[in-house]
Amino acid sequence: MFMKKVLVLYYSRTGNTERMASAVAKGAQISDKVEVELTFHVEPKELNLFDAIIVGTPTYHHEMPMDFKKLFEEAAVQGITLKGKIGAAFGSYGWSGEAPKLILEIMKNRFEMQVESPILAKYVPDEKTLDACRELGKKVSENLMNRI
């Protein structure tokens, strides 16, 4: 059986989304058959090396960070195929919180990925939210392990 690879890619200015990313990565590491990479940078061509991509993005001024916008635009331009891979998103926000939903929209509609519901935290993630993040990571890894 091949090792399944999960990417937990995040951007965090205040540390809130980073805390969520760490919880997601911890939850995803449920088996020695799943390799989890937690990082804040990846090149577009590297995206297709992963079986699942989980993006942690804060919302600033109703937008996702420019780095993520560029990453997905470049992946599309380069013809990167992510069809059928698992996608998920999470993030913190101050007043609007739409960035994770925008990421999921791109994953589903542009890249034809199978997406999970987002986890959102207003300001600082509490323990309940961090538990939900761990559960998201676990769910993604379980879904990968159940695929043939």
Image: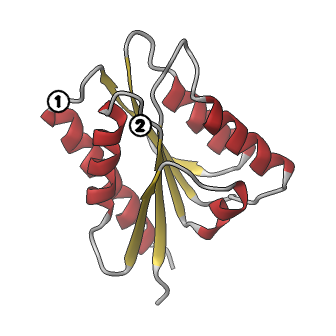
Q: Which residue is drawn at 57% across and 29% down?
A: 65
User: Distance of mark 2 from mark 1, alpha carbons?
Assistant: 14 Å
Mark identifier at residue 54: none
**x then y, percent, for residue 112:** 69, 50
Furthest-front residue in this view: 13
**x then y, percent, for residue 110:** 74, 42
* Residue 31, above or below 103: below
Number of other residues with Cα within 10 Å of mark 1, as a class: few under 14, some 14 to 19, many 20 or more: few
Dot 2 or dot 1, earlier in sequence = 2
Q: Which of 2 and 145 is in front in this view?
A: 2
Q: What residue type is labelled 1?
A: Asp
Q: Which residue is drawn at 40% across and 58% down?
A: 140
* Residue 147, above or below 137: below
**x then y, percent, for residue 46:** 65, 63
Q: Which of 116 and 42 is in front in this view?
A: 42
Name the residue tied to disc 1. Answer: 126
Q: Which amino acid does label 2 sit on?
A: Phe
Name the residue tied to disc 2. Answer: 90
